[in-house]
Amino acid sequence: MRQSHTSLDIATRGRGLKDVTAAVERWVAGAGIATGLLTLFIRHTSASLLIQENADPDVQADLERFLARLVPDGDALFRHRSEGPDDMPAHVRSALTATQLSVPVVDGRPVLGTWQAIYVYEHRRQPHVRHVVLHLIGD
């Protein structure tokens, strides 16, 4: 059993999904582990990770519209506004989605479905650099 880990710095353009699949696949291919389990963890409380459809951009737009309705910026319910009206909504969005993912690795590649991709979901309106830790264990 072997292990490998790294951290990816992901620049976002503000709120929305950023496809990181290619970067993850490159790192996994170079790790030299053919079969195992990949764990991804985002080191932030206002961004998250998703495995989602990569074929129809309407899926991403619909997800954003749904979360905007569910957790609107500037909602009077929230007292925490240290960094602006999107601050607490970003924390709630992160709590409703995922901060870590587990993906099987077979033949040196993450096992994703035909229409699946791995995304960093930026919940803040401003661009950020997000840090995603990758850990791979296997043979």
Image (cartoon, helix red, strand yellow):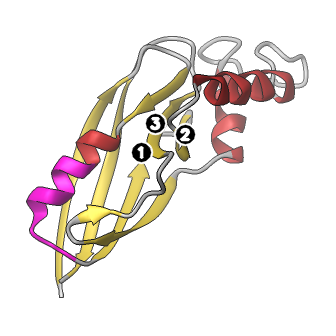
- Taking depth in this image into account, of 115 and 75 the one nearest to the observer is 115
Quick one: label 1, few (<14), some, or many (20+) residues within 10 Å? some
**Residue at position x 62%, y 28% in the image:** 60
Tag count: 3
Q: Which residue is mark 3?
A: 120
Whole-number angstrom distance, CA of label 2 to CA of label 3: 12 Å
- Residue 125 appears in which quarter of the rendering? top right
**Residue at position x 9%, y 57% in the image:** 30
**Residue at position x 90%, y 24% in the image:** 77
Kind of residue at disc 3: Val
Disc 3 element: strand
Quick one: label 3, few (<14), some, or many (20+) residues within 10 Å? many
Q: Which residue is mark 2?
A: 45
Q: Position of residue 120 (x, y in %)?
A: 46, 36
Whole-number angstrom distance, CA of label 3 to CA of label 1: 11 Å
Q: Which residue is mark 1?
A: 43
